[in-house]
Amino acid sequence: MRQVNVGIVGLGNIGGGTLTILAENAEQIELKLGFPLRVRAVCDLLIETKTIPEALGPVLKTGDWRELVAHPEVDIVVELVGGTTVASEIIEAAIARKKSVVTANKELMGLRGAEICERAIAAGANLAMEASVAGGIPIHAVLREGISGDRVVAIYGILNGTSNYILTEMEKHGSTLETVLGEAQRLGYAEANPSADIDGFDARSKLAILSALAFGEKITPSDIFTEGIRRIAPIDFQYAHQLGHTIRLLCAARQTHEGLILSVRPALIPTSTILASVQSSYNAVWVKGQYGEDTFYYGRGAGPRPTGVAVVSDLMRVAREIVSGSPERVSPFAHQRLGEYKPIPVTRQKRAYYLRFRVVDRPGIISTLAGILAAKHISLEAVLQLPCENKHDLPFVITLEPSTEEAVREAVEEMSRLDFLIDPPLALPMEPPL
Amino acid sequence: MRQVNVGIVGLGNIGGGTLTILAENAEQIELKLGFPLRVRAVCDLLIETKTIPEALGPVLKTGDWRELVAHPEVDIVVELVGGTTVASEIIEAAIARKKSVVTANKELMGLRGAEICERAIAAGANLAMEASVAGGIPIHAVLREGISGDRVVAIYGILNGTSNYILTEMEKHGSTLETVLGEAQRLGYAEANPSADIDGFDARSKLAILSALAFGEKITPSDIFTEGIRRIAPIDFQYAHQLGHTIRLLCAARQTHEGLILSVRPALIPTSTILASVQSSYNAVWVKGQYGEDTFYYGRGAGPRPTGVAVVSDLMRVAREIVSGSPERVSPFAHQRLGEYKPIPVTRQKRAYYLRFRVVDRPGIISTLAGILAAKHISLEAVLQLPCENKHDLPFVITLEPSTEEAVREAVEEMSRLDFLIDPPLALPMEPPL
């Protein structure tokens, strides 16, 4: 039987992990496929500094991705450059040559996945992106094949390992976000510029991809309400625990009668749910199906080898399809008729909320806040106050009965002008039991 | 584009769930596939008592499976009869006609999956069996595609919902197995003859299928050391909790230097692991990969609709392959060279053990037991005794440092002859942190 040749552009962490697996696990890969998968060419801007495993045999090394993409023996192009500029050129050049593409690029796929996928299908090529979401968790295979017969009703995910690491460390040690982040940066777990992770943008790209896949709808990051974890303080975990909850940066996509509600934001989730047990940099995805009910997927969210497994598994699937001559014919994105799963603003649905205040103590505070809530027809559920000596920076919490985001936002905005508040109230949704 | 026609044999619970999904979700299935999936024929011994959803349109109803399999318009045969006799005839007749088969039959696939799969491949047909293991969890898709690039090192599973329901109810309420089982039988959760569930045979078939898939080795149920949950008592949960553990019927398949160790047996697992959080009739599978590290999959283990999702998802994959003309060419079972993952007896590996005794109290008991252990070179880790008034039936526990199953078995056998014991000691392995 023939062999399938691979060209890899970008030899950073994921590229390195991918090469290791392709070299070390070559025999098992060939036994599973029935034919060999060979690395024919690799490309990196710093190609002369890169070591290629000897077991791969002779490999073309180049600093010019155009040479790799154009190479007549390269059947599949692996794009591991990241970002939306050069990566997009590489992928488009490969598709133009009717070559299949495997990518780990969440940013580009989150932004333009549906469009690029349609272009690949038109060219008779494959576009595989298991590695773009939740590294070691094969959630693409699950949604595309494993539970394809189901109708997904909701997805809840923990999709950013860095922010989950920060939150679970804060929870465990009572440290501030700044302390944990600083340490994570020193250890190389977090970027020097942590914005993509802690402001929710990385998770947003991943949710855009996952929800497009799950609901078959065109979703772009701008459809997703996004809020980061910067304002979470150690005291919030204490109050959350009092309420039987914990706090996670939760990616949510829920089908409602009116449309699809999409959000990435810190939320209180019950400690009794399996999602609350996701610690450190692990990722997880909870899928609710209309027929299959709840399924839950958990694993490493990043790392050269877990993400490398996703790249190699994609390569194996695409290679099988090349050998059997069967390109995909329906886009995993955007197969729906527009409408049923149209994204709608997060503001319409009612949920319980957690409001945390920091105040300079004086009489009449609760009454003032309760008055603002009452004027918006928001019902107060409970007032919680843990013992605190500092009357000049006193934290306490009000939980609300199910209210719309819109009403809560208006109330928070009005409250923010009150002079006894040290900073604006922190409002977090309390997610229903999953 | 063409359509693919399905014939379903066996309209019990799973058959009913499958028909519901194919009827209700037809539009989304067609959008995902790009062509319709049509139910052309159904067969059941009691066909006249079965209602077929009207939305399916005209469907041939027959009591004779041979008519269905032979029907020229039936492209895929779904076998939902169960058991190893008629089911095997149905599947073999379909394959002989080069028709692909979707089955939920764990017993037959556990026993003869590799052989039947090879026959299907030789005929250019597909054999899909997602529904045979862990109903709603798409673990076949995960192992076959999602993480196919990885090298599986170990699998731990909770694969029998009934026994997990019984154990977690015993844990929660302190009830005996007989009480919980009786209640489960009254509610229809457990069979009148519960042996397949509580003696581990059902789980054993599933582990045979999963480990064959994961390790690519021919595995038969007789390779798997199997022990049921009949001897677990409420007191065992109390002692397990004292040790920071709980008890589950654990399916385990672990690669060692000497070969593959396979077992289905009640085991102590640390409460801190995510596997311990699997409650009630849910199923879960924990996979350890050499490159992708830990991944974990959780969902409904049974039920007409979750299992129906598995059947329908298989139908969609097989239908896609029929339309694109690409049969599988490598058996998901038995793709390895024999040897590396050869099953070996469970007796060789060292693990910590939990030994629970029921004795008529008198002096010298611990010394006698410790003497027997010492003679087998087994080191005692701790002795635990919860307060108990009944000196004529006094339970206590000894935990052992890592020892071989063989040595522990010999010690237990020798101990069983002691006259102060009310029944033979219960020996459970303590699994390492997963």
Image: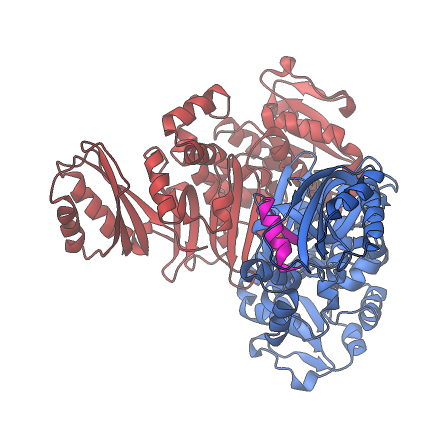
Chain colours: A red, B blue
Q: As drawn, which residue projects farthest toward the front?
A: B363
* Quarter of the rendering occupied by the N terminus of chain A: top right
Magenta region: which residues?
Answer: B233-248
Q: Where is residue B363 in the image (x, y as percent from the top left)?
A: 73, 49
Q: Is residue B328 above or below residue B288?
A: below
Residue at the spot x=66%, y=58% of the render? B391
Q: Which residue lies furthest to the top in this view?
A: A48
Q: Nearer the viewer, residue B270 or A235?
A: B270
Is B164 in front, or is B42?
B164
* In-front residue for pair A270/A253: A270
Query: Which residue is located at x 69 percent, y 80 percent?
Result: B60
Return the x and y of residue B85 as percentages of the image width and height: 84, 71
Q: Position of residue B349 (x, y in %)?
A: 80, 40
Tell me, yes or no, whether the highlighted magenta stretch contains residue B167: no
Residue A114 visible? The answer is: no
Q: Is residue B108 left or right of residue B32?
A: right
Residue shown at 69% from the left, 50% from the top = B267
Q: Is residue B112 above or below residue A367?
A: below
Q: Is residue B369 left or right of residue A195?
A: right
Classify residue B204 by image quadrant. bottom right
